[in-house]
Structures are given as C-alpha cells and as structure tokens.
Image (cartoon, rainbow, N blue to C red):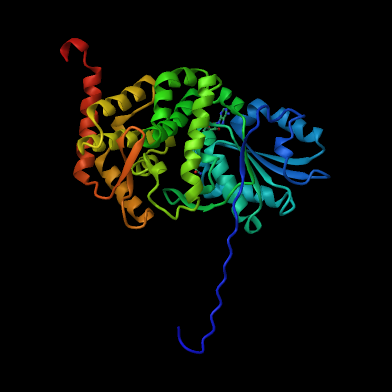
Amino acid sequence: MSEGLTRWRIRQNRPIAYDILEAPRLFEPQNRALLSVGRLEQGRRFVVIDRNVARHCADDLYAYFAHHGIEARIVFFAGGERSKRMDGYLEILRELDAFPIRRRDEPIIAIGGGVLTDVVGFVASCYRRGVPHIKVPTTLMGYVDASVGIKTGINFDGHKNRLGSFEPPLRVLLDKEFLRTLPHRHILNGVCEILKLAIIKDSGLFQLLEAHGAESIVSRFQNPAGGMILERAISGMLEELEPDLFEDNLSRKVDFGHTFSHGLESRHEARLLHGEAVLLDIAVSTLIARERRLLSERETARIFCLIDSLGLPLDISLLDAEILWQALLERIEHRNGLQRSPMPDSIGHCVFLNDITRQEIESSITALHDRTCADHEPALER
Ligand SMILES: NC(=O)c1ccc[n+]([C@@H]2O[C@H](COP(=O)([O-])OP(=O)(O)OC[C@H]3O[C@@H](n4cnc5c(N)ncnc54)[C@H](O)[C@@H]3O)[C@@H](O)[C@H]2O)c1
C-alpha cells in the first residue's frame, strides 16, 4: 500500500437463520403459522398468491386474515415461466408500493410455485433495499427445491434467472395439501428434481423412488411413503445448500441436471417445464457417465427404468447437440471458468468433470435415441 494513504476495512458476519416448517392446514383460523412472525396489533400484510392456487382457497385466505384482524392486500399473480419477467416483477413492486407496510415487522407473504416465490423473493430483496418475506410453496418443485433455499430471480434477455439475488426468507411454511390440486404434469416436474438428488447423492432416496415413487405420484405425495420421500428430498437438498448458501463453492452436486438444461429451457420455453429440461439433461449426462465407465450398464439401466416406471416425460426430439454445447459454454462462465459438471460415478455418488467434449454430447444424444428405439421394439425382435 502507498505510504500516507489511509485505508478503511469494513467487516461484518451477518448470521443467517431461518426455519422451514411443516404447517398443515395453513389457512385454518386457529393455525397461527402464517402470523407467527411480525406485527399482529393493527398489522398489515402484503400477500402475493398464484392465481391457480387462489381459485381453490382465496375465500379461506381472506377469512383467515379477517379472523386475525389483519388488513391484508392480496395480489393474484399468474404462475408459469412467462410471468418470471421484468414486467411481472415490476407489477408486484407497484402493488407493494401502493400498500405501505412496515419495513421490518410486516413480512411479505409469497404463496405459489417456484416462479412466484422466485419473483416475490426478488421483490423482497430489492424493495427498500430488503424487506422480510415468508415463502409458502404450492408446487412439488417449490416444496422440495425452489422455496427452501435463498435464491431469487427473474429471467432476462432470453436467459434463465439472469437477474436475481440471494435473499434468505424469514420462514418457509410447508403444507403438502396444496399438492392435491396441482396438475399431474407439474407433479412429475417436481419428481424430476427429486430424481436428480437421488442419483447424485442419495441411493436410499433412489430406492424409495423405485419402491414407492409411482404410488406417491398417484396420491400426490399424501401417502406415508410420499411423505418420507419429500422429507428425505428436502433434507438432502438442505445438506447441500446450507454449507454453501451463497455458492462460494461453484462445484455443486445440486447442479446435476442443470448443465445443459438452461439452454433447452430457454430455447423451448413454451414446451418444456424446468424439471422436464432437467430430466433431459439427466438422461444425456447419465449416458456420458456410462460412456466414460463411471456408471455400469446395470446402474444406467436402473436409472432409465426408474424414469420409465415413474412415467416421467422424456421428449428426446428436443435434444440438439449445438444447443447443449452452447449451454455448456455458458455454464463455464457461470461457474467461473470451469465446467464443474457433476456426474454420477455410481447411484448416490458423484464426481465433477471439466472436460466434457462436444463429441461426447453428440454420442450421448445418439445413444439416447438408440436406447429409446430399442425400448420400443417388440420383445421378440430383440
Ligand atoms: N430459487 C431456486 O432455488 C429454484 C430452484 C428450482 C426451481 N426454481 C424455479 O422454479 C420455477 C418453476 O417452478 P414451478 O415448477 O413451481 O412452476 P410455477 O410456479 O410456474 O407453477 C407451475 C404451475 O402450477 C400452478 N400451480 C401452482 N400451485 C398450484 C396448486 N397448488 N394447484 C394448482 N395449480 C398450481 C401455477 O399457476 C403454474 O401454472 C422455475 O422458474 C425455476 O427456475 C427456483
């Protein structure tokens, strides 16, 4: 340092602590979970709820706040990836600005899927440089993934989650009753993220899916085994997120299925849900791992057999080597110069690769087409 020049250093370690709680029958008047933090006396709450969720419970929600004497401004927001944009974000900000809330003790409440909690979390992180928020996931994707961490964001300029922040919620409230009205396609969408976790870090979860996945899907995870799967998936996710909430370590197991999927999802926004794109990535990655002898043929077959038996939608006609390659190049920037692609080297375990080639992607897509064709040939011809 040059002599005579003064230097100041600012240091602070701000602790992060928030609870993720099961809160069944959330809108029953005697259930205080939604109001367990924040001001009650003459309190106000700004609530954003997914329109499709509100169709089933808006009356209960109004009645809930009325019962507790809370003045609530309830805003309805359309789910779906198309809402995860600047205009949706600004729309909520304007509504919020028109309904003054106290900056510290009247938390914003976000009730919806991953799109809504990502957008509202981003609003909460920016408004007045940060106001507290509570997340209530209503999709399986939100329940096991989007709501439990601290990432917020919106899509921008054709890129997924290009704008966003790390913003810890005050609390996450889990009521799996919401899954009862979730369309089947969106249940499967969430299962893709559970499968990701099972393959990359939890062979026990993989076995649970093999044994009880199909019945849990049918019962929308209201069955006891479904409850076990959800609990195990959330615990596994948190084991990965908690030590690295701000992604200081960019080699993340939970990025399995998220190396090529961003490109697919952005290109086919109208056709692919997030989990469906992740599943395509899982399939391609599994075959790269197989080709490298990281996975045995038996393990590879087990993965595809599970995908099949759960009825997960694998639309391989959308796979295009150029899109996947460009997605990988983009991920290298995102992961600060290296591919850092998690790859299973057995079921429930992984390594990180930095040298995936375009040729490997092409071979894997070809192998996937061959495998799918073979699966559909009559047994006698095999
Ligand atoms: N922040 C994170 O860490 C994180 C992690 C994973 C995914 N995500 C994001 O999550 C988003 C996907 O989330 P999603 O799959 O929940 O999508 P979504 O929020 O769009 O919800 C899916 C659909 O289900 C409807 N819906 C929601 N709950 C319902 C219910 N209980 N009953 C009936 N209909 C209901 C919605 O209106 C929507 O049409 C993506 O944008 C992805 O990037 C974020």
- Residue at coordinates 56% horizontally, 45% vertically from top-left? 119
Question: x and y percent of residue 12 in the render?
Answer: 59, 64
Which of the 4 image quarters holds residue 288?
top left
Residue 256: in sight, yes or no?
yes
**In the rendered view, would you say 316 is above or below 8?**
above
Residue 216 versus residue 89 in the image, above or below: above
Q: Which quarter of the rendering shows the N terminus?
A: bottom left
In depth, the one of 189 and 217 nearer the eye is: 217
Q: In this view, does 97 lie to the left or right of 228?
A: right
Residue at the spot 79% in from the left edge and 45% down from the top edge: 43
What number of labels is visible?
Answer: 0
Query: Most extreme residue toward the top, as rendered?
Result: 380
Residue 158 in the figure: left or right of residue 93: left
Residue in the foreground of this view, choosing between 279 and 144: 144
Residue 173 locus on image (x, y percent) = 63, 36
Quadrant hosting residue 129 = bottom right
Location of residue 325 with respect to 223 vertically, above or below = below
| Percent of width and height locating residue 282 | 33, 35
Residue furthest bottom as drawn: 4
